[in-house]
Image: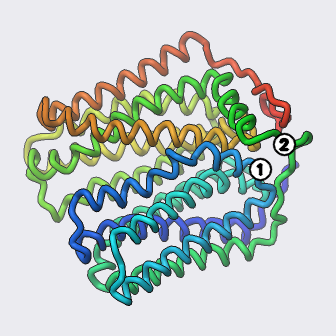
Amino acid sequence: MPLIARPTDMRLYLWGQATSAFGSTLTATATSVVAVAILDAGPRQVSLIVAAGTSPALLFGPILGVLADRVTRPRRTLILVDLACGVATLVCAVMAFSGLLSVLILSGTSFALGLAQVVTGALYFSHLRSLDVGDLSKARGKLQSSELLSRSVAASTAGPLVAGLGAALLFFLDALTYLVSALALGALRSPDRREAPTQARAGLLRELRDGVTAVRTHGLLVAYTVYAVLVSVATSGTTAQRAVFLLDTLRLPVALYSVPAVAATLLAAAGTFVGSRLLSERLTARRLLVICLPAIAVCGFTLPAAQGPLWLAVTAVVFGMGLPVFFGAAANLALVGILSDDVGDEFFGRVGTLLGSVTTFASTLGALLGGVAGERFGVRGGLWLCQALIVLAAVIFLIWVRRGRLHLTPPATDTSLVASGARP
């Protein structure tokens, strides 16, 4: 029988990752706020900071995924990443205190945190196995829920904290969150272990090709990749137009602007909880994914359809933004289960970062196309086009499923032992 994780270890891991998620989101949000409010940065400078944070996934994601799959002591790596993030934010604190903070420094910090996020994302779900959790789906659900709530709190408090504490003290406190996370990880008593492959490692490019093969030979992952690319384009296009739609078209008061986003984050946490319960009791990960993806497409229609009195428009926006992330959080949990159970933990980093790189590129493209669509067809028309693309993605996915193309062919490699349900 599987061992049950020590309650103290599981709680420490949850607290550590929640604190780390809070710190990374607080820094990512605060850098833009500090750039505008303190450094008088314009749109071009802010876009440089944002691009610096997303570029690591585009430039180094696949290679970092290969390296993450080679890590035999993931906890030690996670601790080092937290400490590196703490140093980066501490540098910002010192520079802000001395009056030397600049957009270039903020961009460098954003790049470093983006790089750390890629590594952490490739390791922290698979690190759960070292805690000997009895029910992985529930453990993943708790981990994802705590991260979502932490990110929500950080995003909503970054502005007030900058105004009340100043940039130097904010970055200093942010550095402390990474230290707390590292100490929590260091206090875990479960052995920091990850079984090594039975055969010798190949080169980086060969292992990267093996990761591509792991996706290409798994019918469900191929279908999901096509879906994710289209939805990333549409979602990013929607985000590019949403502020104009809410503030100019619906005349939403600025004081209420963050309400839909906060509600969406809370619904995402609820979706994670419900998804983990369903996976544990009633549904397989595949079936949950097949249910959630079309539901995302259906629920999103209320956003471009929002109109009427303020209370009705706000309600429609909350549902239009919140319900898709509710089902999206459950779908993400199902996807993690599929990656872990079907493909194997040895490929988790490679497959996860490959998907992340592809969707990040699609999101960048979607932001540009969303702006063009909004100008050409009007903001509401542009949102309808983005939603139509999400529906198209769901239809393609369902057709793929209907045709029975979800067979599983184990990735053929010389460096691992991975099969359906096998463990490296």
Q: How many marks?
A: 2
Does the image show residue 372?
yes
Residue identifier under label 1: 70
Residue 418, located in which quarter of the rendered image?
Answer: top right
What is the number of the mark on residue 201? 2
Q: Position of residue 394 (x, y in %)?
A: 42, 24
Q: Residue at x 68, y 70 (%)?
A: 79
Q: Position of residue 390 (x, y in %)?
A: 36, 29
Q: Position of residue 185 (x, y in %)?
A: 69, 71
Residue 108, located in which quarter of the rendered image?
Answer: bottom left
Vertical side of 389 occupied by 186: above or below: below
Q: Is residue 377 left or right of residue 72?
A: left
| The residue positioned farthest toward the top in the image shown | 403
Quarter in which the C terminus is drawn: top right
Residues at badges 2 and 1 in contact (C-beta under 8 Å)?
yes
Between discs 2 and 1, the one toward the N terminus? 1
Q: Residue 94 versus residue 161: which sits nearer the camera?
A: 94
How would you rate the neighbour count of disc 2 (Cα within 10 Å): few for under 14, some for 14-19, many for 20 or more?
some
| The residue positioned farthest toward the bottom in the image shown | 98
Q: Amino acid at mark 1?
A: Arg
Q: Is residue 306 left or right of residue 234?
A: left
Q: Residue at x 47, y 77 (%)?
A: 174
At mark 2, the secondary structure is: loop
Q: Is residue 340 left or right of residue 305?
A: right
